[in-house]
Image (cartoon, coloured by chain):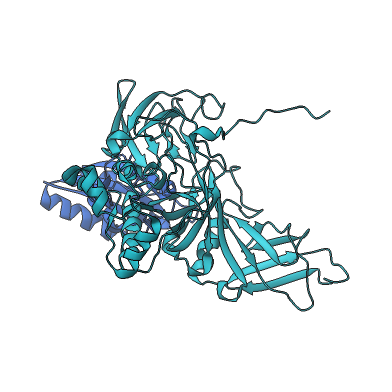
Chain colours: A blue, B cyan
Amino acid sequence: MTSKKIVLHFPHRLVDQPIVYKLVKDFNLSFNILKASVTPQEQGLMVLELVGEKENFKKGIKFLESCGVKIQPLSQDVRRNESKCTDCGVCVPICPTAALEVDLKTRKVHFHNKKCIACELCIKICPTRAMEVHF
Amino acid sequence: MKTIKEINQKIKKGEVVVATAEEIIELVEKKGVKKAAQEVDVVTTGTFGPMCSSGAYFNIGHSKPKIKLGGGVCKLNDVPAYAGFAAVDVYLGATAIPDDDPRNRVYPGEFKYGGAHVIQELVRGGDIRLEATAYGTDCYPSKKLNTLINIKDLNEAVLFNIRNCYQNYNVAVNLSDKMIYTYMGALKPNLGNANYCSAGQLSPLLNDPYYKTIGIGTKIFLGGSIGFIAWQGTQHNPGVPRIDKGVPKVAAGTLAVIGDLKHMKPQWLIGTSMLGYGVSLSVGIGVPIPVLDEEIIKYTAIRDEEIYTQIVDYSQDYPQCRSRSLGEVNYTQLKSGKIILQKKEVPTGNLSSYSKAREIAEQLKSWIQKGEFLLTEPVASLPNEESGYKFKPLKERPII
């Protein structure tokens, strides 16, 4: 089984097309939608946790790409600007997945990219705006 | 018994023994109070967190023809500065924001840029836009000034913070069923989180609870350079409940501090944006405590688990000025990442960076060890517990 969190970028021409359901129908994949939005320029953005057999997973991704959907792994999306972070830790109780965590010894705040679901709650909470979203 | 003079002699000879307020805990435990007091000369403290009552004043020099900003309007990168002085002196407050900032009209406001950010940018060496208008006089005929300014060209650039370095502080929680946005950060509904703001055992005034060594004129680490304690801070409130070792159980003493902004470092003066609340300046401060006798070293050996503070509801109690504590916790509990309140496990967050506080205490220690930082004798004491000095609420009176 493969399970990955991915970000799908739909170009304008695909925004009104039913695409994602085919992942279930044709490739036997299951998914959990973490986030979905259409920007004012009518580009679609969807963050999915996609789960399925390894081969099916590969085929599903290939299908999405063949439709013109741009795919990137989620972990690239929320990043910490290390030069801005002061390790205060006010973000820690806000993060729903414990992706932000205080090291009890050094009292520095660690950002675990892999645990991040890109909910973006930390972005505006951070007093120095060290957490950034990159698309 | 040691004197500050003797300690300074040791600093000059390179024989001084310095420990941070963290290290001294173990030292006193291992060697005992008596021996530790003989061996250690200075304990260094540190704190780094948002301190809203901060600001800086500048003298920009005279333009040709001259202008009198006093009574006029002056903006630095669109952020209004106070110009109610003589011709070319202005004071920029950390929380000032541009007139066209939407504030909380789009709730919660983001407050991305304000006085604190201008101060940080100046310290970084960046050019700042100064735009001013004045009414014009016979001796100061100019009515308009638009220019770039840079910290290196200013006659004076002085950080002058009227309240910093709180001796202990509330833990903020939210009892309501709505998210609230406060100066203590975003507080999730129904006790979703508990935010605190203190360096605890490293915090300057918690290591000298009765202000026996820290006073007016004390030389300190301020913003990465040298500063001085100018006065007690506003809202200084020494007469509060304390534990046996003297540490207050609620917010108590405060400091007003001053120092040359030109020598400060941008990583120790950081503009911060509190969602839904406003702009603030995170300030790095470290105060050296001379170990004059055994009593002083006992104070500096205070630990997180001995420092208690009060949990306060910021949805109703705080805004309505109701002094009610929902409970007492110590800093070991707060730093563990969760506290138990009303039978609920509540995750905690700190607004004050403990790792930066540690860095400041280490930096100050190394300055003293290298002989680069001599201690000063305070020229006057801060009002203490017996002084009767108080932080009072406002008694509103109708204007007839």
Q: How many marks?
A: 0
Farthest residue to the right: give it.
B138
- Image height of B355 relative to B249, above or below: below
Farthest residue to the bottom: give it.
B64
- Image height of B69 relative to B29, above or below: below
Q: Nearer the viewer, residue B62 or B182?
A: B62
Q: Nearer the viewer, residue B214 or A82?
A: B214
Q: Is residue B236 left or right of residue A107?
A: right
Please identify the quadrant where the C terminus of chain B is shown.
Answer: top right
Q: Is residue B93 left or right of residue B183?
A: right
Q: Would residue B167 be visible to someone looking at this image?
A: yes
- Image height of B40 relative to B332, above or below: below
Q: Nearer the viewer, residue B106 or B60?
A: B60
Q: Residue at x 24, y 47 (%)?
A: A115
Residue B99 image position (x, y, % from top left): 66, 53
Residue B149 image position (x, y, % from top left): 62, 72
- Image height of B120 relative to B381, above or below: below
Q: Residue at x 11, y 52 (%)?
A: A55
Q: Would residue A104 be visible to someone looking at this image?
A: no
Farthest residue to the front: give it.
B1
Q: Quadrant of residue B105?
A: top right
Residue B266 image position (x, y, % from top left): 45, 64
Q: Quadrant of residue B249?
A: top left
Residue B262 image position (x, y, % from top left): 52, 69
Q: Is residue B140 left or right of residue B173?
A: right
